[in-house]
Amino acid sequence: MPGQPGFPGLGDAMKEKATRRERFLAAMDAVAPRGRLLGLIAPHRPQAGAKGGHPPMPAETMVRVHFLQNWPALGDPMAGETLCDSEAMRRFAGIEPGDERIPDETTILDFRHLLERHGLTEAIFAEVNAHLADKGITLRSGTLVDATIIDAPSPTENGAGARDPEMPSTKKGNDWCFGTKAHGGVDAEGGVTHSLGSSAARAHDSQVREALLHGEESPVWADRGCVSAERETAFEGPGRVRGVMRKAPRGGELHPVDAQINRIIAVLRAKVEHPFRVLERPFGCVKTRYRGLAGNRARLLTPFARGNLFLARRRLMA
């Protein structure tokens, strides 16, 4: 009858075709190392009844909600509202139909701050990579190095009406912008990010490059920003290749041989763009969300960790 209330989840149970979101969440649920991640986070969660009042949300539910928040780049308020609206996301979070205990904005915010306070975003990134290494996906044979700028909103459109001192301006092409820069060291074989650095957008790529190397790679492939005779000498050795794209002399043109070498290196470096594309397109991390570099770095670690699982999902499910 019109106006008669339905049963929660009944419409989803009668559907004949799963949506793209449901298929995506099912695939990510199958490949995520939930046990390993819960082992990291559970010791830092408040115990039931420790402060009185309502018991805390289960650790697994909050971990799942945190991942849901990072996949479509939702803020804390929108993450809480989306959980109320989407049956698929509630199902992924482990919230039963009809359960009134849905994490709200404050609960999600507190959990995110707990991860940042205890350095657990770094630990999640490392644990996911350890899981991929155990599966033989991260081979550590070579490293591809690249960086991308995550733009900040207009620097004075905030409560203080002032610019963020940790995000000075930089020039990108012909445009000036504010923001942070994400630096990634990507496994040349597996295509997953094994190390992550962050800096102000103004920082030169070469300042972070050494921190992106794990030390066991034989080839390193990088763009023109990492040209350094000193680094080339330090990297010399049997079987070691430092494939940095050639740079034209000031006021001159690139030699045809160097241009051909650059084309070859560009083909080899193409895989380094995949994690950044996943970060910016499916996960929507195209703008900074917080003031300061520390909060934005913590926000980048989880999407990169989940991006590694996304890129390796077919091999993990096979």
Image (cartoon, rainbow, N blue to C red):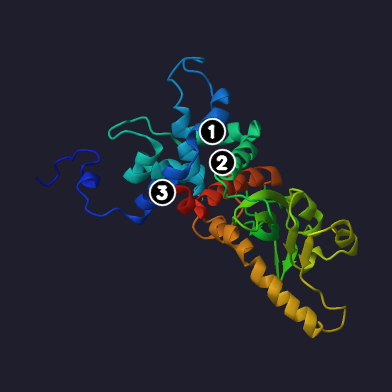
Based on the displayed image, in which of its 4 quarters is residue 224 positioned?
Answer: bottom right
84 left or right of 46 in image: left
Write the residue at 51% across / 52% down.
312
Disc 1 from disc 3: Cα separation: 18 Å
Q: Amino acid at mark 2?
A: His
Q: Is residue 64 left or right of residue 216?
A: left
In primary-sequence order, the first of circles 3 and 2 is 3
For mark 1, does the 10 Å Cα neighbourhood hold few (<14), some (14 to 19), or many (20 or more) residues? some
Q: Nearer the viewer, residue 266 or 140?
A: 140
- Amino acid of disc 3: Ala
Report, in whole angstroms, how far the alpha carbon at label 3 lies from the one at label 2. Answer: 16 Å
Query: Label 1 belongs to which residue?
Result: 36
**Which residue was labeled with disc 3?**
27
Task: Name the residue: 68% across, 56% down.
Answer: 179
Q: Residues within 10 Å of mark 2 (few under 14, many from 20)?
A: some
Labels 2 and 1 touching (C-beta < 8 A): yes
Identify the element where label 3 is drawn.
helix
Amino acid type at circle 1 is Arg
Residue under pointer 2:
131
Horizontal and vertical percent position of residue 38: 52, 30
Q: Residue furthest left?
A: 1
Q: Earlier in the sequence, mark 1 or mark 3?
A: 3
Of the image marks 2 and 1, the number of the one nearer the N terminus: 1
Q: Which x, y percent locates residue 306? A: 53, 47
**Image: 204 above or below 79:** below
